[in-house]
Amino acid sequence: MKSVFVHHDPTVVGLRRSILEEAGIARRTFYKHFANKEDVLAAIYEVATRDLLAQMRSAASSGTTPVDAIRRGLDVYLDHHAANGRLVGVLQRQAIRDDSPLAPQRQRFRDELVTLLDDAVRATTGERNDRMLYAALISALEANLSPSPNETK
């Protein structure tokens, strides 16, 4: 189903039919699991961010210095964006809107990223930095990594 969102605008009314065709499921089955296409986007966002955080934690935990830990975690983050750029762009464009059902999930994800980065530094130095430092880094990465709707992968 992820590929449907990569190739179609999630705000398009007829998107549900594309989701059903891509997944090979009946409309009735779809509605057993999802109320609407926004629920599908939310589920994809949840799985993608949960898996990304787990990979980043694992990578960062093997760092020997604060810079190394952050570098390892961010390498995973950047690799994920490189491999899934169009899907990440779709999800981020939806999640960044305050009225989006993905907005609370995005905020939790960003909070967890900040904690991950802060924990990586604290584990190697015992020091705590201002969390806004990490939030600014994440914002800069988001702004520069998400492809525009017209870009191709």
Image (cartoon, grey):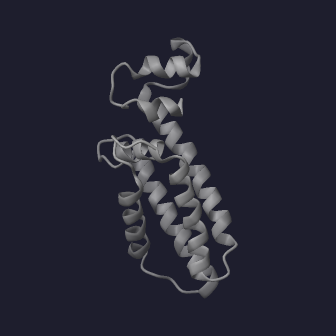
> Does residue 31 show up?
no
For image coordinates 52% across by 37% down, the residue present is 43
Q: Nearer the viewer, residue 9 or 130?
A: 9
Q: Nearer the viewer, residue 46 or 86?
A: 86
140 above or below 131?
above
Q: Position of residue 23 (x, y in %)?
A: 57, 22
For image coordinates 40% across by 52% down, the residue present is 146
For image coordinates 48% across by 29% down, the residue present is 4
Q: Position of residue 92 (x, y in %)?
A: 40, 48
Give the residue at the far right of this rendering: 62
Q: Position of residue 130 (x, y in %)?
A: 42, 79
For image coordinates 29% across by 42% down, the residue present is 99
Does 35 sit left or right of 1 as displayed?
left
Does 7 sit left or right of 49 as displayed?
left
Give the residue at the far front of this rendering: 152
Q: Position of residue 107 (x, y in %)?
A: 41, 55
In the rendered view of the protein, which quadrant contains the N terminus?
Answer: top right
> Does residue 3 show up?
yes
30 above or below 118?
above
44 above or below 79?
above
Q: Nearer the viewer, residue 114 or 151?
A: 151
